[in-house]
Amino acid sequence: MKAIAPGMDRISGEGAFEYLAKAQGLEREGAHVLHFEIGQPDFPTPLHIKEAAFKAINENYTGYVAAGGIADLKAAIQEEIKRTRGFKPGADQILVLPGAKPGIFFSMLALVEAGDEVLYPDPAFPTYGSLVKYLNAADGAIPVKEENEFRLDPADIKKRLTAKTKLIILNSPQNPTGSVMTKDALLATAELAQKHGVYILSDEIYSKMLYDAAFYSPAALDEAKERTLILDGFSKSYSMTGWRLGYLVGPAAIIKKMEILMINALSCTASFVQKAGIAALEGSQEDLHKMMAAFRERRAAIVKGLNEIPGFSCLAPKGAFYAFPNIKKTGKTSREVADDLLYKAGVCCLPGSAFGPGGEGYLRFSYAASVETINEAVGKIKKACPKNKQYR
């Protein structure tokens, strides 16, 4: 039997699904587990979005459509980008995708070759580093510092730039830390990329999920015509994780090449799902506002609660819906603490090390749970992590 391709040994999964499986195993045995591991809003998809999909299905809009996306959704995305980023891209700058993850994969397949360097924050969404390794590219993970509120610093990017650097990945608001880069930092990074002939993939999936800051995109510098690609989608803001709908905005020549990847890998994004996407962008945003009001309340509860636990300290995230507490004073690794919380307290969160070496000494809590559930979890953790030798 022939061996599996070596590249498969360089690609990895996600800690969220590993810990979800552990938690579900305990639940099958009768345990009660409080879930904080999966980055999925616990709100239903807004009714008007569902109704748009029902209508499309009932009208038999269920066949193949253009690989790059239907014209009506592209038009809605054009207006969305104009409204939120300050410029209107051409329809030929847009690629509609079944979820945002293919946008990361396609961007890197289209731009990165073996030996090229990719810069990205550490800790970060695990897919970035996994694909860097899979493509045999040079790993340019840049540690983000708690004292800088986990924001990626353009000065650190500048220090790491080399002749081999091909791509910088930005994610603001960020998973797993909830950090938000300042407008000045994003602009400085865009100027660095322009000066050194480097591409930027700006993962903006949490662009609508901010608490105290305004959103800004580095694509404002070149209007995604030269070196910047915007990645966004519907999973988080519209609670549409299972619908699988996202999009890229970038230089037309690159988008055209990625459309060929789309044809080879996926044919097209589901037709009726795209109709739902139009309703999401053009319809009422009231459900989004209500969801963010709830997340604001939950953020306050979980940050307060985590800061009351011996050995824990937690900054308030500026965006997304993740808390990233420092647990270094427990004297244990992040995986050891995550396992303790799951098996001793029945609280499932993620070790920070699941997001890269820079995440060691931290945990990630997805606070897609009610305030009552958050308070229950904090109480259980306090009981499982008392002030004793194990957690000094």
Image: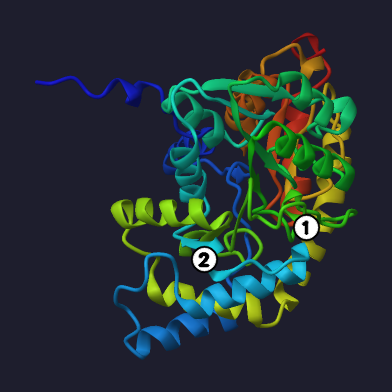
Taking the view exactly as shown, the residue that stands out farthest to the top is 389
Residue 24: x percent and y percent?
A: 46, 42
Residue under circle 2?
Answer: 92
**Three-letter code for the amino acid on which mark 2 is drawn:** Asp
**Three-letter code for the amino acid on which mark 1 is drawn:** Phe
Between residues 55 and 161, which one lies in front from this camera angle? 161
Say left or right for 85 vs 118.
Answer: right
Residue under circle 1?
Answer: 295
Q: Is residue 208 above or below residue 228?
A: below
> Judging from the image, what secondary structure is the residue with disc 1 in?
helix
Residue at image point 49% right, 61% down = 95
Taking the view exactly as shown, the residue that stands out farthest to the left is 1
Q: Examine the image and state in which quarter residue 90 appears.
A: bottom right
Q: Quadrant of the N terminus?
A: top left
Residue at image point 61% right, 24% down = 356
Decide: few, some or many residues near mark 1? Use Cα within 10 Å; few <14, some 14-19, many ≥20. many
Does label 1 or label 2 sit earlier along the sequence? Answer: 2
Decide: few, some or many residues near mark 2? Use Cα within 10 Å; few <14, some 14-19, many ≥20. some
Q: CA distance from mark 1 to mark 2?
A: 36 Å
Q: Is residue 179 above or below residue 40?
A: above
Q: Which mark is residue 352?
A: none
Residue at image point 32% right, 51% down = 265
Q: Examine the image and state in which quarter residue 304 appears.
A: top right
